[in-house]
C-alpha cells in the first residue's frame, strides 16, 4: 500500500539561496533566471506520478512565473506564500512583516485566482510573533517549523512538536511542520532540501517511508535542486559549494523512487483531513 506524503516546493530561483548572497554581491550584472524551466520540470514530474503539491512562492517573481503558478493552481496544486523579498523574519520589523504578508497574498491571489491560506518563512526563520501576524493577516496555517537542532538559523516556536505532526496552534491557525525522524538523541532532518542530497539515500528513504506509514511525512525541496545546469558562481568556499551543488545529479532519480512508493499531496488536502478528524462525533 502506498502511503500519503505532503510535497512542498519553495518557489524561488537559485540565486535566492542564502548561501549565494555574499558571492552574488561581488558579481556584475543580474544572475541568469532558471526558475521557469525548473518549475516546468517539477510540474511534469508531478503529472507523471499523479501527485499534487503546495508551491510556497515569492510574490516578487517574474510575470512569466506568476502565470506558471496560475496554471499550476488550475491543475489542482496549492499556491501559498513564501513572502515577497525573501528576508529572514527576524530582520523585518512588525510593520514590514505585516506589509509583506498582505502584499504577497494579494499578488499571488490576483495572479492565480485561488485563495492563499498558507505561509512558509524564508530559511524557516519563523517566530512566535510572526505567527500572531499571520493570523491577523488572514492566513490559516504556517509551515515553517523545521526542528533540526544542528541548523541554528532555523526558527523555534514556544509551542512545538518534538516529533512533527500537524497541530492547531490556536483556533484558526495550524502548524504544518517539516518532518524529522528521531534517531538516538538526534532529530534526523528527513524533510528533504539539502538533506535529500547529503544524507545516505537508503537511510533517508527508510525514515520517510516509516513516517508516512505512521500518518505524516512532509517533504520539500527548491526548484534549483533538480537543475544540474544552473550557474556555478566563481570564488565560492568549498563547504558552500558542497552545500549548494553536491549530489544535485542524483535528485531526479531519488524523487522518482520516493514517488513510486508514496502518494504526494498538498497541505490544503492534508489540512482538510485533519479538520475532519478533529470534528467531534
Ligand atoms: Zn526560500
Image: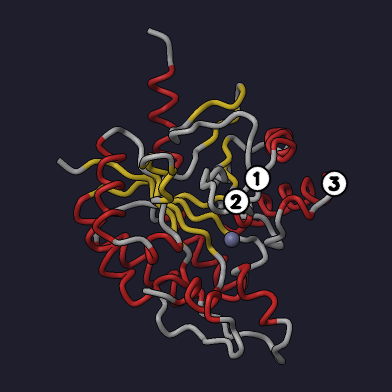
Q: Gap between marks 2 and 1, in whole Å?
A: 6 Å
Classify mark 1: residues with Cα within 10 Å, few (<14), some (14-19) or many (20+). Answer: many
Q: What residue appears at the point 61 percent right and 89 percent down from the top-left corner?
A: 235
Indicate whether 3 appears above or below 243: above
Q: Residue furthest top?
A: 281
Closer to the chain start, of discs 2 and 3, is 3
Which residue was labeled with disc 1? 126
Label 2 with label 1: CB-CB less than 8 Å: yes
Q: What residue appears at the point 51 percent right and 61 percent down from the top-left corner?
A: 69
Q: Nearer the viewer, mark 2 or mark 3?
A: 2
- Between 210 and 62, which is closer to the camera in this rendering? 210
State the image coordinates of residue 139 (x, y, percent, origin top left).
Answer: 63, 38
Secondary element under disc 3, as helix, strand or loop, is helix
Question: In the figure, residue 48 lies in which quadrant?
Answer: bottom left
Indicate whether 239 appears above or below 275: below
What label does residue 243 carry, if any?
none
Classify mark 2: residues with Cα within 10 Å, few (<14), some (14-19) or many (20+). Answer: many
State the image coordinates of residue 168 (x, y, percent, origin top left).
Answer: 54, 26
From the viewer's perspective, tell me whether residue 24 is left or right of residue 269.
Answer: right
Q: Gap between marks 1 and 3, in whole Å?
A: 16 Å
From the viewer's perspective, tell me whether residue 14 is left or right of residue 96.
Answer: left
Secondary element under disc 2, as helix, strand or loop, is helix
Q: What residue appears at the point 60 percent right and 46 percent down from the top-left corner?
A: 119
Which residue was labeled with disc 3? 95
From the viewer's perspective, tell me whether residue 137 is left or right of residue 243.
Answer: right
State the image coordinates of residue 125 (x, y, percent, origin top left).
Answer: 65, 50
Closer to the chain start, of discs 1 and 3, is 3
Which residue was labeled with disc 2? 124
Question: In the figure, residue 268 lies in which quadrant?
Answer: top left
Image quadrant of ligand 1 equals bottom right
Q: What residue appears at the point 36 percent right and 51 percent down from the top-left corner?
A: 52
Amino acid at each position: 500500500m502506498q502511503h500519503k506524503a505532503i510535497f512542498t516546493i519553495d518557489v524561488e530561483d537559485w540565486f535566492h539561496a542564502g548561501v549565494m548572497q555574499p558571492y552574488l554581491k561581488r558579481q556584475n550584472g543580474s544572475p541568469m533566471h532558471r526558475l521557469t524551466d525548473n518549475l516546468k520540470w517539477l510540474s511534469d514530474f508531478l503529472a507523471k506520478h499523479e501527485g499534487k503539491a503546495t508551491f510556497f512562492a515569492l510574490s516578487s517573481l517574474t510575470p512569466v512565473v506568476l502565470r506558471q503558478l496560475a496554471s499550476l493552481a488550475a491543475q489542482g496544486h496549492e499556491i501559498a506564500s513564501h513572502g515577497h523579498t525573501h528576508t529572514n523574519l527576524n530582520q523585518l520589523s512588525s510593520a514590514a512583516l505585516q506589509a509583506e504578508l498582505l502584499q504577497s497574498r494579494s499578488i499571488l491571489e490576483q495572479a492565480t485566482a485561488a485563495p492563499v491560506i498558507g505561509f512558509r518563512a524564508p530559511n524557516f526563520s519563523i517566530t512566535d510573533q510572526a505567527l500572531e501576524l499571520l493570523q491577523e493577516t488572514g492566513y490559516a496555517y504556517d509551515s515553517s517549523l523545521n526542528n533540526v537542532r544542528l541548523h541554528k538559523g532555523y526558527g523555534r516556536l514556544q509551542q512545538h512538536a518534538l516529533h512533527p505532526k500537524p497541530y492547531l496552534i490556536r483556533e484558526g491557525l495550524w502548524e504544518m511542520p517539516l518532518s524529522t525522524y528521531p534517531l538516538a538523541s538526534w532529530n534526523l532532518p528527513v524533510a528533504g532540501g539539502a538533506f535529500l542530497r547529503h544524507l545516505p539515500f537508503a537511510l533517508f528513504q527508510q525514515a520517510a517511508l516509516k513516517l508516512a506509514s505512521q500518518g505524516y511525512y512532509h517533504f520539500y525541496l527548491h526548484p534549483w535542486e533538480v537543475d544540474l545546469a544552473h550557474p556555478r558562481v566563481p570564488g565560492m568556499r568549498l563547504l558552500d559549494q558542497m552545500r549548494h551543488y553536491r549530489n544535485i545529479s542524483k535528485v531526479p532519480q531519488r524523487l522518482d523512487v520516493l514517488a513510486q512508493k508514496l502518494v504526494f499531496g498538498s497541505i490544503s488536502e492534508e489540512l482538510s483531513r485533519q479538520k475532519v478528524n478533529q470534528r467531534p462525533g
